Image: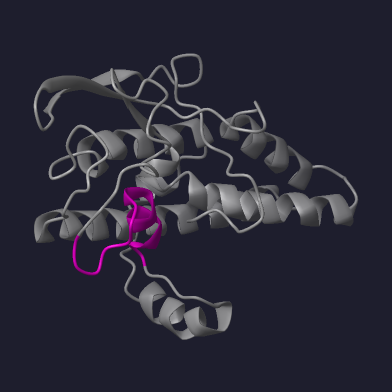
Amino acid sequence: MAATAGTARTAVQTRPATTGIRTSSGTSTGTSSTRRSRVTGRRCRRSQRPTPERIALFRGVLASNAKDPLKSYDLVWLLHLVGDVHQPLHCATRVSSGGPDGDDGGNTVKLNCTGCPAKLHTFWDDVPGSAKTVKAALNPVISAAKKVPTPDPTLAAKTDEKVWIAESFNDAQTVAYQPPIMAGNGPFSLTTTYKDQAHTLAQRRVALAGARLANLLNSELK
């Protein structure tokens, strides 16, 4: 679900204009004071076109009579973005009085715990598993895929990409940005409970992403 190397990360838009989501995560206690934090949607960086609009654009191309070279280009991006928007921290950023521009989806939040990467965002990218090369990842991915739970058919049938993003945004609020992740940029030490909840959620989101992508391709790829 991570962004590919060499490409600008296309962050997602979940502000009121797109999905009507904008809620407060309440107060978080820092080292010396109580600061108010809230989680908002992320805007695109280099491109100002939000991910929902891009996914809709690419889906339209696949369903059209466009030439194969264009379809193949858009298909690669679609595969990437559908996975991306099912990762909670691709769909939210936490802002506070001390960080009004947000934490870049957890990229500025530091971790310090055994077996953890340096950043919270990287932790969530790698929850399903990671490897340094495609070859090294192949067998572990096949093995992990056999353990992915069967997705809820009602949820899997949802075709609106804005709904997928809203789900991830909610997951960021209710799971990713919960203790031991507190106000500020850390470093924080993740608990076993937090890691277990993250793994369970990631498995569920991977299953939904795969089912939704399959439905999308079966219905729209000509």
Residue 59: x percent and y percent?
Answer: 68, 42
Q: Residue at x 36, y 65 (%)?
A: 128
Q: Nearer the viewer, residue 217 or 130?
A: 130
Left or right: 136 in relation to 185: right
Q: Residue at x 44, y 20 (%)?
A: 15
Residue 69: x percent and y percent?
Answer: 87, 56
| Colour pattern | one colour
The answer to whether any part of residue 96 appears in the image is yes
Q: Is residue 135 above or below residue 184?
A: below
Q: Is residue 26 above or below residue 85?
A: above
Residue 122: x percent and y percent?
Answer: 38, 55
- Write down the quadrant of residue 61 in the picture: top right
Residue most toward the right? Answer: 67
- Write down the quadrant of residue 175 in the picture: top left
Q: Would residue 124 be counted in the magenta stretch?
A: yes
Magenta extent = 113-128
Q: Is residue 135 above or below residue 120?
A: below
